[in-house]
Amino acid sequence: HNLPLFEKLRKEAPEMLDKIIPVKGDVMLLGLGLSTDDLQMMCNVSVIFHVAASVRFDDPLKDAILLNTRGSREVFRFGQSLKNLSVIMHVSTTYSNPDRYEIEEMVTSLKRSR
């Protein structure tokens, strides 16, 4: 939590830092490569930030697909397993060259299949 990324939070709401727990995983692996201990610890998570992706255009195609598509699928599958999940914040790396000047941001709800 000593990274510059957390500087504003550290100044304005330092008590919130205790709620941020980084975990080691790999979005290219099924199940996100999460350990059993981490899965158990995260069973009550209510917010997921999904920011893993590759923005390199020279990655091998197989790696780019695994990271950018299967990785997202695995994050959303994990999210669906969480009973207290409120939000998945997905930061997209979509590259586009549209004929429009602006692309409107859309917020969608996660449908649960229970």
Image (cartoon, rainbow, N blue to C red):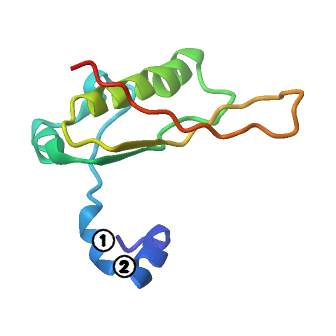
Q: Position of residue 85 (x, y in %)?
A: 27, 41
Residue depicted at 62% across the width and 36% down the height: 93
Element assignment for label 1: helix
Residue 13 numbered mark, or none: 2
**Residue 67 to residue 88: above or below:** above
Residue depicted at 30% across the width and 70% down the height: 17
Task: Report crowding for label 2: few under 14, some 14 to 19, many 20 or more residues within 10 A (C-alpha).
Answer: few
Q: Residue furthest bottom?
A: 11
Residue 16 numbered mark, or none: 1
Three-letter residue code for mark 1: Met
Residue depicted at 50% across the width and 33% down the height: 108
75, 1: nearer the viewer: 75
- The part of the image, by quadrant, that contains residue 75 is top left
Three-letter residue code for mark 2: Ala
Q: Position of residue 18 (x, y in %)?
A: 24, 69
Residue 38 numbered mark, or none: none
Marks counted in the figure total: 2
- Where the N terminus falls, by quadrant? bottom left
Task: Report crowding for label 1: few under 14, some 14 to 19, many 20 or more residues within 10 A (C-alpha).
Answer: few
Horizontal side, residue 37 vs residue 69: left or right: left
- The part of the image, by quadrant, that contains residue 88 is top left
Q: Position of residue 11 (x, y in %)?
A: 43, 84
Horizontal side, residue 58 vs residue 19: left or right: right
60, 98: nearer the viewer: 98
**Gap between marks 1 and 2, in whole Å?**
6 Å
85, 1: nearer the viewer: 85
Q: Residue furthest top?
A: 62
Q: Are marks 1 and 2 in contact (CB under 8 Å)?
A: yes
